[in-house]
Image: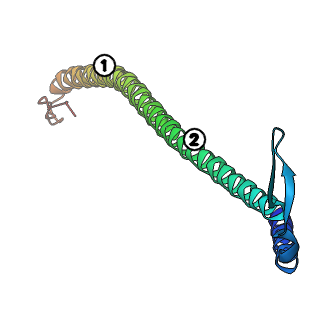
Amino acid sequence: MKSRIALLVLIIVLIGVLGFFNFPYLAQTVPMSLGITTIDAPLGLILLALTALMAVVFVAYVIAMQGAWLLEARAHAKEMAAQRELADKAEASRFTELRIAIENLHREEERKLLERLDVLESHLQARAQESDNSTAAYVGQLEQQLRARSHAASAVPSAEPLDVTPRNTQF
């Protein structure tokens, strides 16, 4: 890009230098044919003016192209910002959906865990009740055996009676 600009500046400077040093020849009036008529005019100055006009038109064209490109770039940037915002909203929506799904999964797992704990607790209570019942049965059997011995021992006068009062067997 810089080499193109340098080349254009060099050509413009060259035309200016040639016009400056050869101005008397450019300003000479010569017969000039316009197709239907012939007039006397300075041909060099007319050609130099047309070259300057072409340069102005070229610069205006370049400025218009740059302006159009800038407007298009600005519109593209706005569209990209809108797309980015839309993508951010979609991503936030996906994160929200993911969070809700994880919370639902957590609640379901927590519910299953609590159900399992309830089942285990009821099994543990049943086992504790069975253990209490079997301990009470063993204690009752031992009391019965002790009473049977105490009745047998009461027949013998030297034996002292044993204390066989029931005790609280719950833990």
Residue 117: x and y in percent read 35, 26
Question: Which secondary structure lies at badge 2?
Answer: helix
Reading the image, the residue beneath label 2 is: 76
Q: Nearer the viewer, mark 1 or mark 2?
A: 2
Kind of residue at disc 2: His
Kind of residue at disc 1: Ala
Tell me: residue 107, above or below residue 39.
above
Tell me: residue 118, above or below residue 15.
above
The extreme bottom residue here reads 21
- Number of residue marks: 2
- Neighbour tally class for label 1: few under 14, some 14-19, many 20 plus, Cα within 10 Å: few
Tell me: residue 13, above or below residue 124.
below
The quarter of the image holding the C terminus is: top left
Reading the image, the residue beneath label 1 is: 126
Looking at the picture, tell me which residue is in the foreground, 170 or 51. 51
Residue 67: x and y in percent read 59, 50
The quarter of the image holding the N terminus is: bottom right
Looking at the picture, tell me which residue is in the foreground, 118 or 168. 118
Q: Residue at x 30, y 25 (%)?
A: 128
Looking at the picture, tell me which residue is in the foreground, 165 or 48. 48
Q: Disc 1 or 2, which lies upstream in sequence? A: 2
Looking at the picture, tell me which residue is in the foreground, 141 or 70. 70
Label number found at residue 68 = none
Q: Quadrant of residue 151?
A: top left
Residue 158: x and y in percent read 17, 36
Q: Residue at x 41, y 33 (%)?
A: 96
Tell me: residue 45, above or below residue 33.
below
Query: Mark 1 to mark 2: distance in Å?
Result: 74 Å
Q: Residue at x 30, y 23 (%)?
A: 138
Answer with left or right where residue 149 lies relative to residue 3. left
Q: Quadrant of residue 53?
A: bottom right
Q: Residue at x 81, y 68 (%)?
A: 12
